[in-house]
Amino acid sequence: MDQVEQDRGRPPAAPRLVRHSVRGQILDALRAALVSGELAPGEVYSGPVLGARFGVSATPVREAMQQLALEGAVEVVPNRGFRVTERAESDLSDLAEVRALIEVPTMLRLARTVEPGRWRALRPLAEAATAAAARGDRTAYAEADRAFHSAVLALAGNAQLVDVAAGLHRRAQWPPAGAPVPRQADLVADAAEHMALLEALIAQDLPVVQSLVREHFTGAH
């Protein structure tokens, strides 16, 4: 069998890549809508309606929603679509506690072992969060916030830790039902904590690092 005949028997790769790309884009858009509150807790959304909104078929929307269901953001409502999960303030407190159990000791260990140059490399991420906060862009800030925390934890060299922490962080950013919209001043203050923490890590000022890390998670950021 020559190469032409072999190629005829192979399925084309491009459509699969395009489909995954669309699904990924829809997933990112839905995650942003959850953070902004545009997808409201308790409301039911159907695949066809959301597909029309994004200008795509219902299939990639349903696939993205299934991923969000695995993450706990939505739940399947048979024959209707997906309901955005309703959560209480206590859920945020619980998530903050679990995140602190994972991230605080890791950050404190890294503060003692990572050289200043590697911390300096994270400055653009902290600056991106600062810029998003200054614009009052909650969605961009949420992404920058996760990126900064993930980059810090990545220095531990444990991909599983980074993945688990990122999932918890994402869930902590979904607003509970009836929660007020975060003020721009809150975003600016949170971003300032990132910068202060990074400068203390670069300076290897362990007492300040310890204080800032614990305060950051006490505020459930």
Image (cartoon, rainbow, N blue to C red):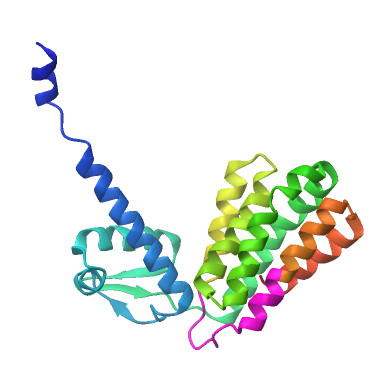
Q: Residue at x 57, y 74 (%)?
A: 91
Residue 133 appears anywhere in the view: yes
Q: Residue at x 61, y 69 (%)?
A: 131
Q: Nearer the viewer, residue 124 or 41?
A: 124
Residue 189 lies within the magenta run: yes
Percent position (x, y) of residue 214? 79, 65
Q: Residue at x 53, y 75 (%)?
A: 137
Q: Residue at x 23, y 43 (%)?
A: 16
Q: Which residues are magenta?
A: 174-191
Quadrant position of the C terminus in the picture: bottom right
Quadrant position of the N terminus in the picture: top left
Percent position (x, y) of residue 219? 71, 74
Residue 213 appears anywhere in the view: no
Q: Quadrant of residue 58?
A: bottom left
Q: Is residue 123 above or below residue 179?
A: above
Percent position (x, y) of residue 140? 52, 68
Looking at this view, name the residue that lies furthest to the top: 1
* Left/right of residue 183 with respect to residue 110 in the rendered view: left
Percent position (x, y) of residue 127? 66, 62
Residue 116 lies within the magenta run: no
